[in-house]
Amino acid sequence: MDFRGWHVYDVGMIEQKTGAENGVKLEDIVSLCKRRGFIFPGSDVYGGLAGTWDYGPYGVALKRNVMNLWWKMFVTERDDMYGVDAAILMNQKVWQASGHVDTFTDPLVECSNCHGRFRADKLEKADTCPNCGQKNTFGEARAFNMMFKTNVGPVDDEASISYLRPETAQGIFTNFKNVVDTIYPDVPFGIGQQGKAFRNEISPRDFVFRSREFEQMEIEYFVHPDAWEVSFDHWVEQCKKWFTALGLPEGSVHELEVAEADRAHYSKRTIDFEFDYPIGREELMGLAYRTDFDLMNIQNASKKSMEYRPKDGGAAYVPHVIEPSFGVERAVMAVLCSAYWHDTENDRVVLRLPYELAPVKVAVCPLARNNPELVAKAREIYAMLKKELGDVLWIDSGNIGKNYRKMDEIGVPYCVTVDFDTLEGDTKDTVTVRSRDTTEQERVTTTDLFTLIHEA
């Protein structure tokens, strides 16, 4: 059997279904993540802090792989994209000019009985408190600004106010002229950024789907005002390629053309891409045509020109912007939900992660850990793979069946077992390679091992 081509699961071999079709529940994902070192509740040893999550060894590897894949697809592999990493803390004028200080709010209601506070627009029953069950205990909704406010420097006054950024986009816009003046790119071009964002959510919920601290991957793509529709359509297709790269099943992602009444005030067109999570169909990412709203706000507030001067001597203009905005945690959650599979035939839980996203690519295991010669050979093979692939795991505890089951739950595509046949006879210098998705095993030479895995 040829293992090449197995890096992304073969949908002809194993039908991939959405979380809803699989019957996967949110508690299945949460349990697996905690049990196998992916995601833990934040500050858990002290009773936790609502809306915060800590990523364990495999979780941080998965998240980094998602972010690295995004950077590769949307920045390094393109000729029209440039990266920045703007500061989290910025001058308060940034958020005043963008409108966040005045308008970045959610409707807040408080129960007069239990004093629980909730987002008014997310209550299933507008007259019933979900905390205490009492009816007609809510007063009038009031605006609640979701930005975390802080002070910069030793003096606590109005001039020292800053905010933990609620989005990464403004860091891109404030660096627009810096990039133009130093790189002088041709329009259209984009600026991409990954980083932390913070929102003081009234009701964080549904695992990492809605939390108070999260990461974004955002692009501001600057275009001529007359060319925005072509660029918008281009980014629709690029987003679809991203979903495929994440291994999201066909049919699990849906395009929602957002009506004018529901769009952000700066947007002239928005598409929300929604995913079939176990919690229901919810937003995975958004694509918006922001016109020249942000650059004009900066120009008006700073009194500095945001015009772009074409290299051919044409008339200067303020570019318009197409914004694909990706949430890291929502992407990770979609990947986990898509990859989670209860293999009833073999009574196992499997994470069928695409090879490029798997936190561990290969696990190497000696059949007997108390045999020095066997362990030494296994260590030699482990070192070879570790040097070339990096994400390789050594396991020598428990029986081989339990090790396989554990690796399946972590999402390891291949397990390499070094046994006594590896040491002598006609099978010397061969190992057993097991496929995560099919459980099928093949004996291959150690010289072919790297080729089979690396070239797949």
Image (tube, grey):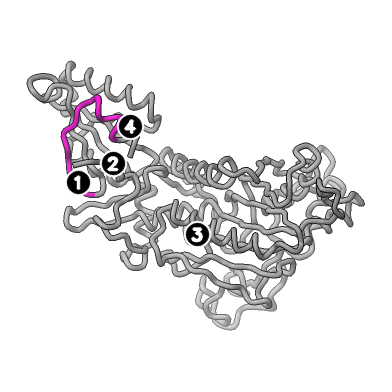
Q: Which residue is mark 3?
A: 240
Which amino acid type corresponds to the residue marked 2 in the rendered image? Arg
Three-letter amino acid code of the residue under disc 3: Lys
Front label number (4 vs 2): 2
Question: Which residues, given as a range, are shown in magenta?
Answer: 438-452
Tag 3 near tag 1, CB within 8 Å: no
Dot 3: few (<14), some (14–19), or many (≥20) neighbours within 10 Å? Answer: some
- Picture quadrant of residue 222: bottom right
On screen, residue 10 versus residue 85, left or right, reads: left
> Dot 4: what SS?
strand
Q: Which circle's residue, 4 or 2, is located before the other in the chain?
A: 2
Q: Which residue is mark 1?
A: 439
Amino acid type, callout 4: Leu
- Residue identifier under label 4: 393
Quarter containing the N terminus:
top left
Q: Is residue 187 visible?
A: yes
- Dot 3 falls on a residue whose secondary structure is helix
Q: Is residue 112 left or right of residue 266?
A: left
Dot in front, 1 or 4:
1
Mark 4 vs 3, N-terminal side = 3
User: Callout 1: helix, strand or loop?
Assistant: loop
* Residue 299 horizontal side relative to residue 17, left or right: right
Identify the residue at horizontal 55%, vertical 71% (top origin).
Answer: 256
Q: Position of residue 149 (x, y in %)?
A: 74, 51
Most foreground residue, 312 or 216: 312
Camera-side mark, 4 or 3: 3
| Nearer mark to the viewer, of 3 and 1 | 3
Question: Compared to 265, does 170 lie above or below?
Answer: above
Q: Is residue 182 above or below residue 341?
A: above
Q: Which residue is mark 2?
A: 4
**Separation (CA) of disc 1 from disc 4:** 18 Å
Which mark sits nearer the N-terminus, 2 or 3? 2
